[in-house]
Image: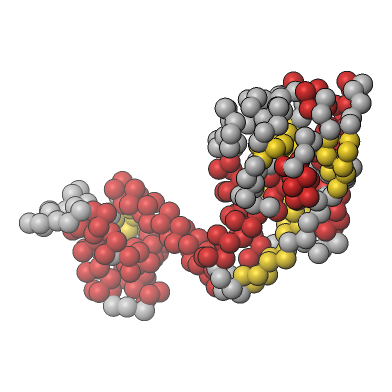
Amino acid sequence: MPVPAAPWRPDPGAAALRHMRVWTYLLAIEQSGSIRQAAERLNIAPSALQRRLRDVELDLGFALFERSPAGMRPTSAGEIFLGWVHRLCTDLERARQQMAALRGLRRGHVRVAASQAVASDFLPRQIAAFQARYPMISFACPLVDHSGATERLMDGSADLVLAFGLVPRPEIMPLLSIGQRLCAVMAAGHPLAARPRLRLRDCAAHPLALPTQDFGARRIVEAWAARSAVPLQMVLESNSFELLRHYVRDTSAVTFQIEIGALPEGGAGLVAVPVDDQDLAHGPLVLAQLRGRALPVAAAAFAEHLARALDARRTTPMLGAEEAPPTPPPSAA
C-alpha cells in the first residue's frame, strides 16, 4: 500500500543518496524481519530505527516492508529498492578495495621486459603517462627478444613482458595480444617510399639492413625468402633498430620493423610502408605475466594501463597508412 506522499518530495535517486547512512539499517530490518531485533543488533533505539525507515518510505513514496504478527518482510517495491541497495553496497565495497589498493601506488617499482619495437616511442610514452598520475612509481625496462622475455618472467626478474612474437608456453599468461604487421622502413627519397604498400619481393630488389636473427622482423623476412626462394642482399646486420634506422636514412637500403615501432617520434627523413598481407608478414605483440603469480599492486595497475593503451591502437591506423592494420584478429586473454 502506498504511503501518502509529502507535499514536496525530492527525486528518489537524490533522496536515496541522502540516506546512505541508513542502508545498513534497512538491510538489518530485512535480515531480522523485526524492527526491535534490528535495533538491538544496531544498538539504537527501535523508535529511532522506525523514524529512519519512515523517512526513506516518505521520500520514495512506497512502503518498503509489510508489517504482520509474523514479522516484517519486503513489499514488491521494497524488494526492488533493497535489491538496488545490495548492488550499491557491493559496488561501494569494490570501490573501497580499489581505493585501498591505490595506497600501494604511492610508492612501487615495476619491471617490464620489452621488445625494442616498443622501446623507442610507445613504452616510454606510457611510462611517462603513468608516472604523471603516480610519480613515486619507478621502472626497470630491459630490452629483450622473445626468448629473453620468457626467461625474465620465468626467473622472476620481470613482472610483465611486452614482446613481439612471444612463443606460447603454459607458464606464460597473455593479458592482451594485438596483431602487428611488418613495415618496410627507408629514406623518404627512396624509390619505394611513395607506394601505399609493398610486397617483400619489391624490397628484396634493394640492399637490406636487417635486425639479427633473434628478432621477429628478421624471422618473418627470412621465412618469406625461404618460401619464395629469393636471395636477400643483406648489407648490414645489427641488434639496434636505432642504428638500422639511421643507416637506411642515409643509404638506399631498406630495413623492417613492426608498425608500433616503425616510425618513432624524431624519425624525420624516414618513411614506413606496410608490407602487403599476401606475404604473411605479421605477428602478435603480447603483453603477458607469469601464470599463477599475483602481481604487485603497481605492476597490476600498469598492466591495466598498458592494456588500455594497446587496445586503443586496434582501431588507430598507422601513420602514413591508408587503412587500419589488417593483421590477424587480435585476441584478449
Q: Taking 87 as reference, is 213 left or right?
A: right
The vertical placement of 253 against 96, above or below, is above
Nearest the viewer among 202 and 279 is: 202
The answer to whether 40 appears left or right of 250 in the picture is left
Residue 235 visible in the current orientation = yes
Q: Is residue 169 above or below residue 88?
A: above
Identity of the residue drawn at 92% across and 21% down: 229
Horizontal side of 266 relative to 36 (left or right) equals: right
Q: Position of residue 116 (x, y in %)?
A: 75, 51
Above or below: residue 168 compared with residue 107: above
- Image quadrant in which the C terminus is located: top right
User: Can residue 169 be seen in this snapshot?
Assistant: no
**Residue 179 found in image quarter:** top right
Which of the two residues, 305 or 321, is positioned nearer the viewer here?
321
Please state which of residues 300 and 261 is positioned toward the viewer in this rendering. Answer: 261
**Residue at image coords 78%, 60%:** 142
- What color scheme is it? secondary structure
Q: Residue at x 7, y 56 (%)?
A: 7
Give the total number of marks visible in the rendering: 0
Residue 56: name its quadrant.
bottom left
Give the residue displayed 21% in from the left and 64% down from the top.
55
Residue 151 picture location, percent across and down: 86, 56
The percent coordinates of residue 60 (x first, y second) are 22, 54
**At which x and y percent is residue 331?**
67, 37
